Image (cartoon, rainbow, N blue to C red):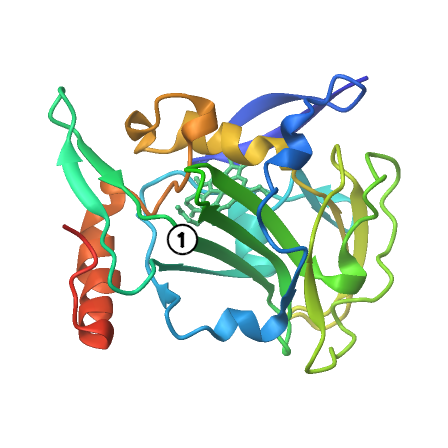
């Protein structure tokens, strides 16, 4: 079965053909291999994960394959205004450096040390600001980039989930979380639907949000095809960070690298 999912990249709607059938590549699940299955919620507060800004004119990552409120499909900008806040953070093992060089076309290439970790944290815009998704990219000792999506444990779609009518997760983002609850690595296939009831800040009443989750096997594909720094990846299998990369170097050097130098006393880019 083929499903057409509209995903917005850089304000443009790119139509992606998503195969949700036996033709799902085996590597869909393997993309996350090497990442822990669970993370304590507090992992978000690790002191070495310093925030960076994305290029305001660059492409944007979709929140899902589709986001609907009260039956109406939202654009990325509408979903960001109403439902989600975003933060980006990165760390390298202290004492190491990202090696900066140029390729034969004179374009900057970053060679990231093993253990480089980049995060995209998406939170609901409700008073508690719980995590909707924590998306992670980490460079493993074998040189591969692992891609993973984490959600609060009661909100992960079952790994067998593929498509079908949106169903409510076991607990709602409105339920206060215990301080020690975990984030779990998602292992579903396809674009499962999830239904949430929420009261975003500034809204008078609860609204019904239906989301089709991103196909997990598209993480690396999109990062290869749409990153403004895609030139530094030879093949899709090599693709890693999108915004934590040369084309966004000005933001990384100004904000992130300066705070890193202050905190750890070494310059993180060489
Ligand atoms: C359709 C394209 C697309 C898909 C699919 C996608 N991303 Fe991204 N991602 C982006 C873009 C573009 C950015 C940077 C700009 C932004 O989000 O504002 C980004 C940023 C990130 C970042 C922040 C670090 C950085 O280099 O900017 C992480 C981490 C990340 N993505 C992980 C994931 C994971 C994990 C998945 C799969 C669950 C995923 N992404 C799916 C396009 C995509």
Residue 145, percent from left and from top = 46, 40
Residue position for label 1? 115
Q: Residue at x 53, y 25 (%)?
A: 14
Horizontal side of residue 236 vs 189, given as left or right:
left
Horizontal side of residue 35 vs 162, given as left or right:
left
Of residues 184 and 144, the one drawn nearer to the viewer in this rendering: 144
Quarter of the image where the N terminus is located: top right
Residue 49 position (above or below residue 58): below
Residue 146 position (above or below residue 20): below
Residue 163, percent from left and from top = 83, 34
Packing grade of label 1 (10 A; few <14, some 14-19, many >=20) is some
Q: Does ligand 1 reach within 8 Å of label 1's beta carbon?
A: no
Outermost residue on the bottom side: it is 179
The answer to whether any part of residue 215 appears in the image is: no
The picture quadrant where one finds residue 241 is top left
Of residues 240 and 80, the one drawn nearer to the viewer in this rendering: 240
Residue 220 position (above or below residue 1): below
Q: Residue at x 51, y 48 (%)?
A: 77
Horizontal side of residue 87 vs 148, given as left or right:
left
The answer to whether any part of residue 37 appears in the image is: yes
> At numbered mark 1, what does the secondary structure look like: helix, strand or loop?
loop
Q: Residue at x 18, y 69 (%)?
A: 261
Residue 28, percent from left and from top = 66, 31
Residue 107, percent from left and from top = 16, 29
Q: Residue at x 85, y 45 (%)?
A: 166
Residue 11 position (above or below residue 48): above
How many numbered discs, if any? 1
Horizontal side of residue 249 vs 137, given as left or right:
left
């Amino acid at each position: 079965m083929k499903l057409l999912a509209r995903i917005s990249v850089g304000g443009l709607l790119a139509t992606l053909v998503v195969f949700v059938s036996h033709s799902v590549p085996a590597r869909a699940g393997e993309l996350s291999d090497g990442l822990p299955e669970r993370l304590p919620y507090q992992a978000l507060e690790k002191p070495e994960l310093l925030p960076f800004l994305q290029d305001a004119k660059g492409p944007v990552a979709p929140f899902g394959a589709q986001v609907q409120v009260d039956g109406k499909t939202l654009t990325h900008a509408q979903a960001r205004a109403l439902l989600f806040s975003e933060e980006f953070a990165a760390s390298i093992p202290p004492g190491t450096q990202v090696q900066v060089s140029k390729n034969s076309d004179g374009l900057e290439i970053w060679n990231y040390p093993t253990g480089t970790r980049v995060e995209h944290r998406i939170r609901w815009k409700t008073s508690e600001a719980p995590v909707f998704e924590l998306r992670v990219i980490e460079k493993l000792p074998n040189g591969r980039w692992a891609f993973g999506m984490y959600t609060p444990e009661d909100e992960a779609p079952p790994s067998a989930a593929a498509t079908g009518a949106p169903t409510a997760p076991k607990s709602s983002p409105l339920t206060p979380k215990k301080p020690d609850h975990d984030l779990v690595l998602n292992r579903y296939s396809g674009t499962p639907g999830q239904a949430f009831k929420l009261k975003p800040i500034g809204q008078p009443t609860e609204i019904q949000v239906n989301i089709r989750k991103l196909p997990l096997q598209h993480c690396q594909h999109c990062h290869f095809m749409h990153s403004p720094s895609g030139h530094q990846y030879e093949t899709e299998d090599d693709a890693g960070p999108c915004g934590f990369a040369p084309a966004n170097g000005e933001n990384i050097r100004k904000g992130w690298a300066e705070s890193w130098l202050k905190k750890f006393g070494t310059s993180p880019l060489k």
